[in-house]
Amino acid sequence: MNTANIRQNFPIFAAQPTFIYLDNAATTHKPSLVIDRIHDFYQHHYATVRRGIYPLAAQATRAYEHVREQVKNFVGAQDNQEIIFTKSTTDGINLVATAFAEPRLQSGDEILISASEHHSNLLPWQQLCVKKGAKLRILPINLRGEWQLNELPNLLSERTKMVAISHISNSLGTINPIETVIQAAHEKGIPVLVDGAQSAAYYPIDVAALDCDFFVFSGHKMFAPSGIGVLYGKAAHLAAMQPYQFGGEMIHSVDFSETVFAAAPAKFEAGTPNIEGAIGLGAAIEYIEQIGKNTIVWHLHQLISYATEKLAPIRNLQIIGNATQKTAIVSFVLNNIHPHDVATFLAEAGIAVRAGHHCTQPVMNFFHIPGTVRASFSIYNTPEEIDQLAEAVRATQRFFGA
């Protein structure tokens, strides 16, 4: 992959050529294709979607629904009706927790998550268990940041009503063996939600092959705008679920005594949607497919290998999360220097990283640390930037006398 050519697709790097952006697990920058597509939509094609019969509205509706088709193909779904547009990964998880899991959950039932989940895939299930008198069970991790799958048979039972797991850990970079968990859960008839926030942009996704019941991800982590996300759900589940929110454009008929809701996906998309966000998401999918996910995966593998090689030997630096299967995320601590101080020093050197608990406080508690410095890489990052990161870390140590 020609990273120099890739960088030319992103206006942020033309505007700030020395800027080193290593916070891609939080959000990604946007290529010109996405920016221009949204600008063109606003300038020439904007209208609200559905029901409008004038040409501009019909055109906008076709463009919006075309993106649903793109997403269907992007994740390997069977039908457009299985694709729900949401605000974010978090919104999709909350939708499933409220509309699917809650009606099926009774006092004494259990929900299983892993010990490495982002708060967005912890809090909805935790609070649902509190509300319903159920129990949240945890699949533990080891010191490498990998799931302890030997514990799985003891955690799945007839009381388990839902499993919710992340494809990739946002704070450790571990690529989790979700196929194993899905198969084990389905052997007991337990539905599974997969949080694909960190994987959708880079790794091949085939929800039909995975056989997951739900798959969620966000646009802003895959070069699309913020405020747009996707929930994939098996058609039978979506048909049985009641709406999550109520309002316009999600009904079949209404009077003062009764409402008949539309079929999915409309019944889960109340109100005027984020049309321009969906348009941008479609452009982002086109961009990713132009590069090719196999090419992207190879590039990420090269970056994480090189970053580990450069950072691991640094005195008093400890990498947190050393899974055998890992994406291009490296989290580390420097002895006696708070992660926020490290990130501040790196920012002064023009390097953007993330510091803190990364919305995974239980992970930090497990490792007995307040947080980490996280460098997360994407398609526009280079080995030379990793060299500068390593040198800046050494400079940080010299400054603090550590």
Image (spheres, rainbow, N blue to C red):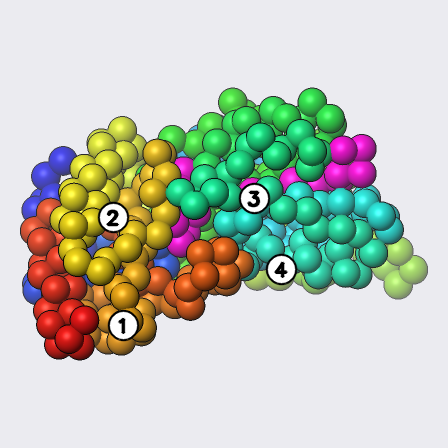
Disc on res. 378 = 2
Which is more N-terminal, label 2 or label 4? 4
**137 shown above or below 178:** below
Disc on res. 140 = 3
Residue 170 in the magenta stretch? The answer is: yes
Q: CA distance from mark 1 to mark 2?
A: 27 Å
Which is more N-terminal, label 1 or label 3? 3
Q: Secondary structure at mark 4?
A: helix
Residue 304 in the magenta stretch? The answer is: no
Residue drawn at x 48%, y 31% is: 177
Magenta stretch?
A: 157-175
Q: Main secondary structure of the magenta part?
A: loop
Residue 274 visible to the viewer: no
Q: Secondary structure at mark 2?
A: loop
Is 2 left, or right, of 32 in this rendering? left
Q: CA distance from mark 3 to mark 1?
A: 28 Å
Mark nearest the camera among 4 and 2 is 4
Disc on res. 123 = 4
